């Protein structure tokens, strides 16, 4: 199966298959926000704006990495980018390796003309650094007119896919390439960065991390749907570090690095929980696919509702901005009414 066909089948699986974790949850449900009835705030005065990678977003939100490389991916990316521009949020493109290997696929990632001021993040697999030079990464970011580059690390997905499964020495290769003339992030794809990964990355000149925890889309399940049309190894596909745990573990190891929480953060309230646990902003991907099929207005409506819920949750805990949410959370241990 070539890369372009795999891209199409990934979309089909995410739109039609049972690709969410079945038993593993984000862990966010084990926490509750600490309500403050006398904070003395104005809801309209809650300021969602968030500086990130040299730009100021209107909210601590990224449209997560999803697609690109073929016709449907182009249609979806254009809808997502138009909505991101309208809402003032960031956007991470899907894995862009296909744009380096198939020049005709480049147009499906070119969203800058309709999103001139959006924080745009290109995306490439860490495992692919064996085949590309530093100059290739720079060229990719330039071709996409992106502001930054995310390198995704995904050993479980690659193993199920039978893809690039040799991860030996990759951190050394990355270290030799850094710094690059733009911010570089490292992210998982939905099985989570934990304490061990954070310790391995500590000391590298990275601009941010995306924990991409378990509890949302299992990309091992996606790959089994693509290969077999069904999930044949359900226990294997449940492997991962829940999003809440990933936030806590990474933040403990790297207390100051900008941290993105993704992986099942599907409501504005859960987003504020993630901020309270230690994230700086959140990313959402698969729930935006169906709205993107309808067009940019449907994506914008989803984002408006999500961000209004986020604003209301911040107001309810007495946080005037996303940074003030930090620590305003507690375990669900109280058994009263």
Image (cartoon, rainbow, N blue to C red):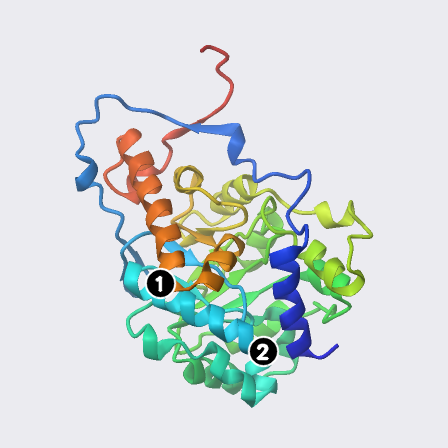
* Badge 2 or badge 1: first in the primary sequence: 1
Q: Determine if residue 233 is in view.
A: yes
Q: Which residue is mark 2?
A: 97
Q: Residue furthest bottom?
A: 103
Foreground mark, 2 or 1, reads 1
Quarter of the picture containing the N terminus is bottom right
Horizontally, residue 185 falls left or right of residue 159, namely left
Residue 287 in the image: state x and y as whole percent. 51, 52
User: Which sits in the foreground, 82 or 315?
Assistant: 82
Horizontally, residue 215 falls left or right of residue 330, namely right
Quarter of the picture containing the C terminus is top left
Q: Is residue 46 above or below residue 293?
A: above
What residue is rendered at 38% in x and 46% in y?
Answer: 306
Residue 50 in the image: state x and y as whole percent. 29, 53
Q: Quadrant of residue 207?
A: bottom left
User: Which sits in the foreground, 172 or 36?
Assistant: 36
Q: Determine if residue 133 is in view.
A: no
What residue is rendered at 35% in x and 57% in y?
Answer: 300
User: Which sits in the foreground, 315 or 178?
Assistant: 315
Image mark for residue 83: 1
How far apart are labels 2 and 1 at the CA level? 24 Å
């Amino acid at each position: 199966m070539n890369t372009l066909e795999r891209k199409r089948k990934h979309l089909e699986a995410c739109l039609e298959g049972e690709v969410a974790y079945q038993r593993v949850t984000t862990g966010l449900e084990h926490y509750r926000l600490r309500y403050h009835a006398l904070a003395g705030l104005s809801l309209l005065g809650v300021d969602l704006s968030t500086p990130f990678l040299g730009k100021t977003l209107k909210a601590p939100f990224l449209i997560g990495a999803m697609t690109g490389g073929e016709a449907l991916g182009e249609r979806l990316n254009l809808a997502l980018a138009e909505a991101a521009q309208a809402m003032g949020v960031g956007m991470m493109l899907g894995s862009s390796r296909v744009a380096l290997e198939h020049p005709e696929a480049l147009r499906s990632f070119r969203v800058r003309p309709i999103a001139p001021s959006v924080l745009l993040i290109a995306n490439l697999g860490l495992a692919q650094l064996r085949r590309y030079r530093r100059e290739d990464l720079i060229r990719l970011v330039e071709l996409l007119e992106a502001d930054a580059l995310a390198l995704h690390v995904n050993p479980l997905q690659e193993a199920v896919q039978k893809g690039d499964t040799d991860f030996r020495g990759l951190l050394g290769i990355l270290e030799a390439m850094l710094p690059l003339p733009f911010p570089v992030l490292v992210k998982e794809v939905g099985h989570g960065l934990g304490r061990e990964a954070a310790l391995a990355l500590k000391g590298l000149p990275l601009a941010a991390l995306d924990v991409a925890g378990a509890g949302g889309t299992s990309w091992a399940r996606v790959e089994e749907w693509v290969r077999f049309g069904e999930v044949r190894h359900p226990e294997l596909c449940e492997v991962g570090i829940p999003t809440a745990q990933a936030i806590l573990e990474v933040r403990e190891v790297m207390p100051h690095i900008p941290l993105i929480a993704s992986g099942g953060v599907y409501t504005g309230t859960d987003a504020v929980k993630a901020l309270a646990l230690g994230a700086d902003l959140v990313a959402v991907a698969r729930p935006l696919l169906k709205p993107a099929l309808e067009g940019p207005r449907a994506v914008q409506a989803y984002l408006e509702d999500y961000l209004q819920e986020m604003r209301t949750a911040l107001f309810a805990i007495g946080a005037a901005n996303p940074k003030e949410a930090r620590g305003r959370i507690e375990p669900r241990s109280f058994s009263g009414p």
